[in-house]
Image (cartoon, rainbow, N blue to C red):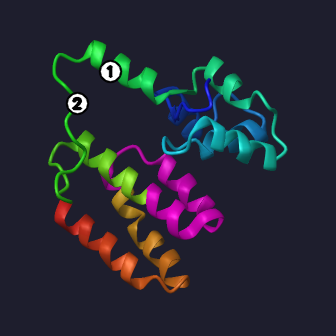
Amino acid sequence: MRDSDVPVKTNEGRDEIQHRTRKLPTVLRSILLIVDGDRSARHLRDLIASLHGPGDALEQLETMGLIASSAAVAATQLAHSPTPAAPVAVNGAVPADAAERYRTLYTLMSETVREHLGLRGYFLQLKIERCGNSEELAELLPDLSAALAKLRKDDIAAEIEARFATGS
């Protein structure tokens, strides 16, 4: 995987997070958890080095089919889709389609945890990863709001709650 590539979890990777069927070593599981589709491979390698993880961790996860380059995933989706992918959200409005709603809520919650909670949000991010639909994600909203409130970021919590309310 090139340094400029942006790794994302595959369906198998998300399944592994939820079910732990492969019994990954703790270090590899932790690295799988931090693959979020926003950080480049270079950035992730720097994080992996700080965690004293194996230098080829991304390649190991890719070989196992748990992660892939976002460019490769996009190319595969285009090849198998007769129509172009629909936008996740338009002007902040949450789409009505269940899959799109899930992606929107997942992205919103994951970005919020990463941006505002950092490592304090690790366990909350694990809960987000385990959610299989938008209703399960919505059930985590009080936990996210409480975590933000602890950091005195009530305005952020209110904004997120408003986004969820528009999607309901």
Q: Is residue 168 visible in the rendered structure shown here?
A: no
Magenta span: chief secondary structure: helix
Task: Let me know if residue 27 is in the magenta part.
Answer: no
Which residue is most to the right?
A: 52
Residue underneath mark 1: 77
Could you tell me which secondary element the residue under label 1 belongs to? helix
Comparing 140 with 28, the one in front is: 28
First-in-chain label (1 vs 2): 1
Mark 1 and mark 2 residues within 8 Å of each other at the beta carbon: yes
Residue type (three-letter) at the residue carrying disc 1: Gln
Image point 28% across, 19% down: which residue? Answer: 78
- In the shown orientation, is residue 139 left or right of residue 116? left
| Figure quadrant of the C terminus | bottom left
Residue underneath mark 2: 85
Image point 25% across, 66% down: which residue? Answer: 163
Relative to residue 105, is residue 42 depicted above or below? Answer: above
Q: Is residue 55 visible in the rendered structure shown here?
A: yes
How many marks on residues? 2
| Residue 52 percent coordinates (x, y) | 85, 44
Image point 36% across, 25% down: which residue? Answer: 74
| Residue 68 percent coordinates (x, y) | 53, 25
Between the C-alphas of marks 1 and 2, the distance is: 8 Å
Residue type (three-letter) at the residue carrying disc 2: Ala
Count residues near mark 1 (Cα–Cα under 10 Å), then give few for <14, some for 14-19, many for 20+: some
Could you tell me which secondary element the residue under label 2 belongs to? loop
Comparing 22 with 13, the one in front is: 13
Quadrant of the rendered image containing residue 120: bottom right
Q: Which residues are magenta?
A: 110-136
Task: Let me know if residue 130 is in the magenta part.
Answer: yes
| Figure quadrant of the N terminus | top right
- In the shown orientation, is residue 78 left or right of residue 6? left
Relative to residue 30, is residue 124 depicted above or below? Answer: below
